[in-house]
Image (cartoon, helix red, strand yellow):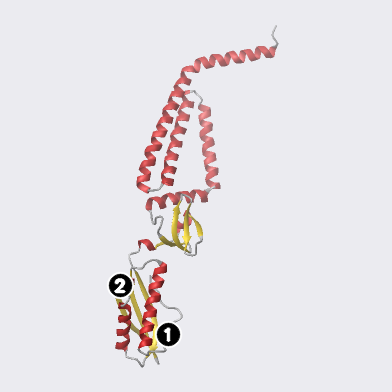
């Protein structure tokens, strides 16, 4: 005679066998449905990746969007398969678990999530591209890479700067590569013993010599104040040299040319105010 624990095991195995035979059609159907969902998920992922890449031109964004949809379709397939297997309580438990885990992860990684969402918006709106010269968050440099979490920028000093996308998305951005032209403006003080008409003529001629190299145009010259025994003059012009370094070179060459003209014509005691006005 078999021991009681042996009989108990035999009864459990027999019950499981009967339940397995009973659920076999459901199991086959569940596997079939899950397979369909997996195939559909791959198809959706490929289509989404191509469509999003056409819109954003960013492989990282297309990968994120296609991966998210792929996961959602797979989860839907798993839930459908469990429902066919009459595992309703398991489905409910999984949904509750996913919700709790998602909520916990949302609080724990809210900064990371913000960076990913900001990166997606940056890739879609495209306020700048790789190779553009931009200024943001106190850094000025060339964009080397745009990732979902951060943007890589190389400064003129060669520094490799990683800026979180959330900070870029929430703060002003100056994109010099999308600026058509910039205005250069500065003031200088000269003695009132010189001819005002002659000084203006010298300044204009000095700047016109630089027009080919610096694309200078729309030169404006004004006397803005009398500070006995001096006069204050303001000169401004537009240039296509929009890169910050080229912009400073153009300003430097303009000031040097004007000073040289003053020196050649023996106009001395010309001063530049301590805080020259520079307009961009």
Depicted 20 relative to depicted 149: above or below: above
Depicted 5 relative to depicted 132: above or below: above
Identified at 51% across, 49% down, the residue is 112
Q: Which mark is residue 212?
A: 2
Identified at 36% across, 87% down, the residue is 264
Identified at 37% across, 61% down, the residue is 177
Neighbour tally class for label 1: few under 14, some 14-19, many 20 plus, Cα within 10 Å = some
Residue 135 percent coordinates (x, y): 44, 63
Residue furthest to the top: 1
Secondary element at image label 2: helix
Q: Tell which of 130 and 273 is nearer to you.
A: 130
Rendered image quadrant of residue 187: bottom left
Residue 108 percent coordinates (x, y): 56, 47
Residue 215 percent coordinates (x, y): 31, 71
Mark pair 2, 1: CA separation: 27 Å
Question: What residue would you read off at disc 1?
Answer: 271
Depicted 159 relative to depicted 119: above or below: below
Rendered image quadrant of residue 263: bottom left
Q: Tell which of 274 and 76 is nearer to you.
A: 274
Q: Is residue 234 left or right of residue 168?
A: left
Determine if residue 227 is in view. Answer: no
Residue 50 percent coordinates (x, y): 37, 41
The N terminus sits in image quarter: top right
Q: CB of mark 2 within 8 Å of CB of mark 1?
A: no
Depicted 212 relative to depicted 92: above or below: below
Identified at 54% across, 44% down, the residue is 105
């Amino acid at each position: 005679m078999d021991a009681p624990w042996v009989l108990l095991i035999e009864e459990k195995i027999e019950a499981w066998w009967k339940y397995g035979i009973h659920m076999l059609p459901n199991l086959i159907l569940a596997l079939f449905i899950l397979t369909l969902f997996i195939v559909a998920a791959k198809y959706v992922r490929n289509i989404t990746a191509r469509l999003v890449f056409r819109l954003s031109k960013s492989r990282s964004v297309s990968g994120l969007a296609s991966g998210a949809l792929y996961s959602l379709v797979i989860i839907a397939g798993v839930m459908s398969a469990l429902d066919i297997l009459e595992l309703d309580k398991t489905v409910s438990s999984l949904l509750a678990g996913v919700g709790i885990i998602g909520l916990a992860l949302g609080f724990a990684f809210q900064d990371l999530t913000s960076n990913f969402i900001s990166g997606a918006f940056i890739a879609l709106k495209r306020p700048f591209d790789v190779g553009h010269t931009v200024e943001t968050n106190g850094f000025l440099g060339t964009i080397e890479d745009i990732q979902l979490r951060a943007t890589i920028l190389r400064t003129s000093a060669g520094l490799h700067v990683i800026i979180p996308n959330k900070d870029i998305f929430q703060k002003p951005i100056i994109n010099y590569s999308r600026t058509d032209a910039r205005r250069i403006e500065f003031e200088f003080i000269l003695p009132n013993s010189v001819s005002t008409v002659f000084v203006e003529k010298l300044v204009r001629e000095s700047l016109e010599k630089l027009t080919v190299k610096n694309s200078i145009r729309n030169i404006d010259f004004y006397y803005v104040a009398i500070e006995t025994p001096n006069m204050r003059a303001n000169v401004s012009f537009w240039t296509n040299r929009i890169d910050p370094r080229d912009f400073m070179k153009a300003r430097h060459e303009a000031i040097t040319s004007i000073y040289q003209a003053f020196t050649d014509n023996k106009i001395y005691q010309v001063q530049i105010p301590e805080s020259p006005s520079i307009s961009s």
